[in-house]
Image (cartoon, helix red, strand yellow):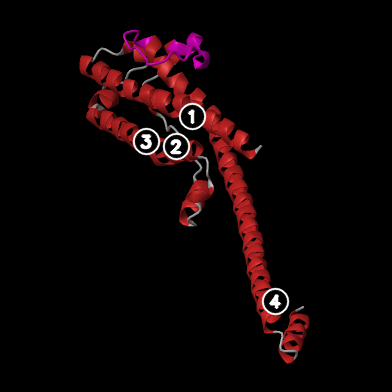
Amino acid sequence: MLKFFRKIRQKMLIENKFSKYLVYAIGEILLVVIGILIALQINNWNEVQKSKRKATTILKEIRSDMFKDLELIEELKPYWGREIMYFKKVLPSFNPRKEITSFAEFDTISKISYSELFGYDMPFRSNTSAYDAMIADGNSDLIINDTLYSNIQRFYTFNAPTNENLFEILRQGSSDLNYKYAPILTYKPYKNLSDLTDENLIADLNIYFESKNFYYWRTFVINQESLMDIISQIDKELK
């Protein structure tokens, strides 16, 4: 094409048709400029499509991680809820933030020992791999829905670390209780929680289980609601 235009230009110069050559030259420049603009437009369109595909991949991966979180919540809720409601049954003065009646086997309450309420509780830890990868790669701007990104960011930068901090507080509280009341528990063992008579121990247990109930409410109830809401937003964005 360029060779063809060059021949025409040379022919015009030879025939001394300068005015026609000038018009032709301007036209040729315009064609080149238009070609460049079209090429840039196509390149920009390709980049936009590539960004959209990448954003879709990121959202699907975050969605997958959040479904794993929901599955873990459903797995852990019964264990945490059962202990809280056992304690309430033994000490009715305990007032949990949220009733958790579906997890308690009330016919066995009389058999619940002190030690059974302080077994190892598995913490809830969010799957953050997709979010962490997005931040590390500098791809957070690919999620153009500001509300959706804000909700995702809040979950991973506030909810997730809050879960970790609350669990550490509980773990330390359990350790402190066992250390503080070791002589009582060792030399005056209680067969059942209903046998408790030490007022200080009862008061400390109330405080501990209030914290445990808050962890349950904040970690399992609130997080479950947040995760389901964000997943719903992601589904709408992916349509």
Question: Do the CB atoms of the residues marked 2 and 3 lie less than 8 Å apart?
Answer: no
Q: CA distance from mark 2 to mark 1?
A: 8 Å
- The answer to whether residue 198 is left or right of residue 171 is left
Q: Is residue 115 visible?
A: no
Q: CA distance from mark 2 to mark 4?
A: 62 Å
Q: CA distance from mark 4 to mark 1?
A: 65 Å
Q: Amino acid at mark 4?
A: Tyr
- Closest to the camera, between mark 1 and mark 3, is 1
| Badge 3 element | helix
- Closest to the camera, between mark 4 and mark 1, is 4
Query: Residue at 67% of width from left, 75% of height from top?
Result: 23
**Crowding at label 3, few (<14), some or many (≥20) Cα neighbours within 10 Å?**
some
Question: Do the CB atoms of the residues marked 2 and 1 lie less than 8 Å apart?
Answer: yes
Question: Which residue, as the protein is rendered here, is positioned at the far bottom?
Answer: 14
Q: Earlier in the sequence, mark 4 or mark 3?
A: 4
| Badge 4 element | helix
Instruction: Give the residues in magenta.
Output: 90-109
Instruction: Name the mark on residue 155.
Output: 2
